[in-house]
Image (cartoon, helix red, strand yellow):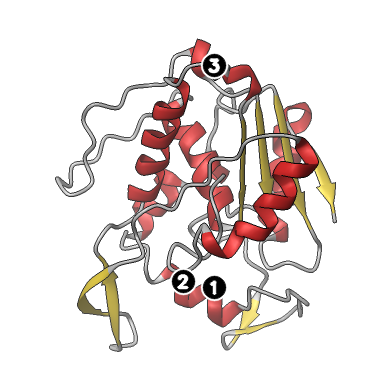
Amino acid sequence: HAHGGGYATGSVHAYAGFLERLALRLNARILSVTTKGYEYCGMICDNTNQLVQTPEHPYPHQVNEFAIAYEWLTQQKNVDPDNIVLMGDSAGGNIIFSFLHQYVGPFFFKQTNKMLTITHLKIIPKARRPRVAVGICPQLDLTDSRLPPTCNDQLVIQFNDPVLTLDTYNGYMKFLGINNATKRQLSVFFAQDLSFLPEHTLVQASDTELLWRQNMEFAQRAEKKITFQVR
């Protein structure tokens, strides 16, 4: 499990109650991963000349750390990859699908930044790949191209998202620490080859949520590879 929080907030502890209920309901053990990326260092000017904090561990460091956790899990005794379910919501959903995209699919991102490089990780072999992935309104497009239309930084179509407002979203995205070209390169939404998706993939989203459009369009493009549920 990878929790949400815009790569800047949230923790395993914040999700403890939900994960406990889920474990009891499924009679399953849950490994929830909190990755680095929540510590910040230095200051930069954004395009409005305002100072913003820069992340000590820029994206996709979080994806790499999730890959380390998955690698560790599959090496444990009595752990059958066929019984592993990947799950994440919002930013956590991005992490699980980006992990599949980068470490299972044909795309294997090799970082040049020494701070991000994890040299011992390889493509996950087929025998150790998960068969199930569940994304709860995951962020699939890092470029903002599938956000609702805006006028003067205000939403033209109003969404009743109880958690993620446009201002909050824009604030979170400043913390990624990557440029627009890299955002597109790393966005699962733009993947041409979707063979990295597990045999059983479920994406849930509500038409009141800010990330609704990218979830719906990705599910439509994936066709039979994804079960798409509207909440």
Q: Residue at x 62, y 66 (%)?
A: 147
- Mark nearer the viewer, 1 or 3: 3
Looking at the picture, does residue 91 appear above or below residue 112?
below
Where's the N terminus, which quadrant? Answer: top right
> Which amino acid type corresponds to the residue marked 3 in the rendered image?
Asn
Residue toward you, 192 or 137: 137
Where's the C terminus, which quadrant? Answer: bottom right
Q: Which label is found at residue 172?
A: 2
Badge 1 vs badge 3, beta-carbon distance below 8 Å: no
Secondary element at image label 2 = helix
Q: CA distance from mark 2 to mark 3?
A: 38 Å
Secondary element at image label 1 = helix
Looking at the picture, does residue 180 appear above or below residue 82?
below
Which residue matches tag 3?
Answer: 78
Residue 173 position in % (x across, y down): 44, 68
Q: Is residue 196 left or right of residue 27?
A: left
Q: Is residue 217 left or right of residue 45?
A: right
Q: Which label is found at residue 169?
A: 1
Q: CA distance from mark 2 to mark 1?
A: 5 Å
